[in-house]
Image: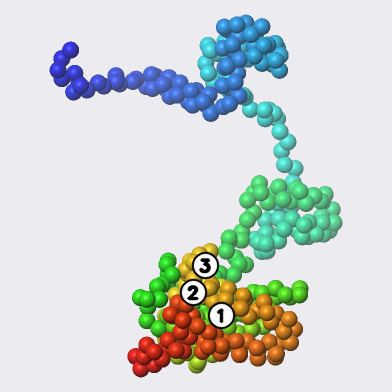
């Protein structure tokens, strides 16, 4: 064997026009056969027949009749055993019904659809019946009107017409929950809670500073941006330090009025990714603590909002000024704030 056998280049002979047509026909035949499960099953039947005869086919495929098998065999051999002869032919009848809708009605439907693109076939039929009654023309059914609209493609309404377009604003998102040890005070996480009690939902807004653990909870009539704005005002007025960043999820209560209030206060607003509560881990924790230590004990007072808000206010004072926090080395948020000198530093 020559040493340079691997470096030889082989070229195929150039096909003539007739040879190219034969090649493409053969390729089309093979591809059509390969995509038809019925054709491959028929070819398998004939293979069994040529090897084992009718008895073998009857044992392997008891549901196939002799007449059906010989019909496949006749078509296969009549075309020189070409694979595409086994591909099922179209079952469309040679003569089909032609649409019988009068041209004057087609023109009327077109005119109505151009003037009123959203008008459906049920309403169009009322106008068509009136026109036919006035002119003595035979009317048509709703189904015929629908087929006429599809046949002549009488669609004139744009895909976005009649739909409210949402304003797309670029949001700054955060992938990971920030670390308290690497963040300066003034970083808040805010969230909303929906609590079900006695066939009614009650709504709360919560906020927590991830460094000093100062927290806020407020009962509101419903979750919307207006009450979230009022809650933000309360947080900014009672915070121990200047707030520089607020992190929320993508709820509607943190849009519109809330966003406007955040911008006016010149505070950075960060969003978490949808369906990713771990990013808001600190406020999720305060939500659990609030429900476990307070709400489950005073839920009966929800029927008396004034008494409930009074108890909630007392509990928030206890949480921020008297309750030891393990994450603060058993100091309260206010004690931690005073001890670390944050009042002078920030």
Q: Check residue 173 in the rendering and tell me which mark sits there, or answer none.
A: none
- Residue 288, compared with residue 33, is above or below; it is below
Residue labelled with disc 1 = 206
Residue labelled with disc 2 = 282
Q: Residues within 10 Å of mark 2 (few under 14, many from 20)?
A: many
| Residue visible at 57% across and 16% down in the picture | 44
**In this view of the protein, can residue 267 be seen by the observer?**
no
Q: Residues within 10 Å of mark 1 (few under 14, many from 20)?
A: many
> Tag 1's secondary structure?
strand
Who comes first in sequence, dot 1 or dot 3?
1
Seen from the viewer's position, the closer of residues 161 and 334 is 334
Give the quadrant of the N terminus. Answer: top left
| Residue visible at 42% across and 88% down in the picture | 337
* Residues tagged 2 and 3 counted as in contact (Cβ below 8 A): no
How far apart are the two marked residues, 1 and 3, measured between alpha carbons?
14 Å
Which quadrant holds residue 171? bottom left
| Residue visible at 56% across and 80% down in the picture | 206
Residue labelled with disc 3 = 277
> Tag 2's secondary structure?
helix
**In this view of the protein, can residue 195 be seen by the observer?**
yes
* Residues tagged 1 and 2 counted as in contact (Cβ below 8 A): no
How far apart are the two marked residues, 1 and 2, measured between alpha carbons?
11 Å
> Tag 3's secondary structure?
helix
Who comes first in sequence, dot 2 or dot 3?
3
| Residue visible at 18% across and 23% down in the picture | 7
């Amino acid at each position: 064997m020559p040493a340079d056998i691997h470096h030889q280049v082989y070229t195929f002979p150039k096909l003539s026009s007739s040879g190219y047509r034969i090649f493409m026909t053969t390729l089309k035949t093979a591809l059509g056969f390969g995509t038809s499960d019925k054709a491959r099953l028929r070819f398998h039947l004939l293979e069994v027949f040529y090897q084992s005869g009718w008895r073998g086919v009857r044992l392997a495929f008891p549901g196939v009749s002799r007449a059906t098998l010989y019909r496949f065999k006749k078509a296969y051999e009549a075309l020189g055993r070409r694979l595409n002869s086994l591909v099922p032919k179209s079952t469309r009848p040679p003569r089909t019904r032609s649409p019988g809708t009068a041209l004057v009605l087609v023109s009327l439907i077109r005119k109505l659809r151009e003037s009123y693109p959203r008008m459906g076939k049920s309403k169009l039929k009322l106008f068509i019946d009136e026109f036919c009654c006035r002119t003595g023309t035979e009317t048509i059914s709703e189904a015929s009107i629908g087929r006429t609209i599809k046949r002549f493609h009488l669609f004139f309404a744009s895909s976005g017409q009649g739909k409210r377009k949402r304003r797309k604003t670029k949001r700054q998102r955060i992938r990971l929950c920030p670390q308290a040890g690497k963040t300066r005070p003034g970083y808040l996480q805010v969230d909303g809670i929906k609590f079900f009690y006695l066939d009614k939902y009650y709504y709360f807004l919560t906020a927590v500073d991830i460094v000093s653990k100062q927290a806020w909870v407020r009962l509101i009539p419903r979750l919307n941006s207006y009450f979230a704005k009022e809650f933000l005002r309360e947080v900014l007025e009672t915070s121990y330090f200047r707030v520089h960043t607020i992190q929320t999820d993508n709820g509607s209560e943190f849009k519109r009025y809330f966003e406007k209030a955040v911008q006016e206060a010149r505070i950075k607003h960060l969003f978490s990714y949808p369906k990713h509560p771990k990013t808001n881990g600190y406020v999720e924790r305060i939500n659990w603590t609030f429900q476990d230590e307070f709400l489950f004990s005073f839920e009966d007072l929800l029927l008396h909002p004034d008494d409930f808000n009074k108890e909630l206010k007392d509990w928030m004072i206890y949480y921020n000024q008297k309750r030891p926090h393990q994450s603060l080395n058993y100091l309260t948020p206010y004690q931690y704030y005073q001890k670390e000198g944050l009042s002078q530093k920030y």
